[in-house]
Image (cartoon, rainbow, N blue to C red):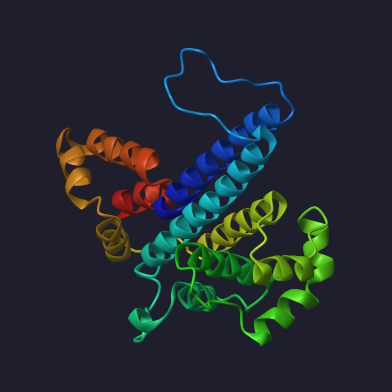
Amino acid sequence: MPTPALSFFLSNVGQTVHHLNTAVVALSGLEHGDVRKPDDLDITWKPADVVTSARKSRLFLVKSSLVFVATALTEYVDTVVSYPCLTRPSNWSELSNAEKLVSLNRLTGSSEDYLVLGPSLLIHWRNRIVHPKSNAALSSRQRDILLKASPEIKANYKNLDPAKLITDFESETFTLKGASSLVAMSINLARRIDKSFFPPATVDDLKEWIETFGFSSELEAVEKSAQGEHGLKKGEMYLRTNCSFLANSYAALKRTG
């Protein structure tokens, strides 16, 4: 079962991908002359060259989506590192967002493979978009890891070439395929991280997780709204709606003590 942080991340990123794809389809229609500005749309829009304008707008959307997904991924990382089963590194506040991602990946038992380095590259790309003078980049060792994983990356991400991906990053060439692939990697990485978390096995652990997720007050009110078994069932339903990750543990532990 996903933790609330993963559910929130997947929802936000899923909406971003849908909005990006919808806009790209619309811009394609504009570029090929199948779309025109409605007469009742009260905006100023007089492009000198419709095709050029559509292509530049697509580039803007790709860059914007990278920024949004990188921000959502960073928020996921900052939320997850506070989970009771993890010990946040003492230098956490000194790490860059990309370094935090790699650190969290390590904390959850995974090696520094392409699945964490692709999303790290996405975060670096976000920094270069937002801060034009940024020199954010993968280390030479990380680049080598990404390049050596070329066969696996090509097999799993529609023949994506990591060498071209790195070249595009260095030349600030943004493509829909590259962005979509990095977003897909970010989703898969977040899912892998989340799978490393196991539901609580004791009542004390359950209480700590509930407090960490910020459900204590609402859950207590739900439990008190009915007596005995009925109150527990309402509490279980509340968690199945808001935090499926804890629902089964709650159902078992609350009845066995």
Dividing the picture into quadrants, the one containing residue 148 is bottom right
Residue 65 percent location from the top left of the image: 53, 50
**Does residue 22 sit above or below 101 in this rendering?**
above
Residue 181 percent location from the top left of the image: 68, 55
Q: Is residue 152 left or right of residue 124?
A: right
In depth, the one of 222 and 147 nearer the eye is: 147
**Does residue 129 sit above or below 16 in this rendering?**
below
**Does residue 79 sit above or below 218 in this rendering?**
below
Q: Residue at x 73, y 82 (%)?
A: 144
Residue sitting farthest toward the top: 40
Q: Residue at x 55, y 55 (%)?
A: 66
Q: Residue at x 71, y 71 (%)?
A: 166
In depth, the one of 115 and 238 nearer the eye is: 115
Q: Residue at x 62, y 43 (%)?
A: 58
How many numbered marks does the figure carry?
0
Residue sitting farthest toward the front: 48
In depth, the one of 125 and 254 nearer the eye is: 125
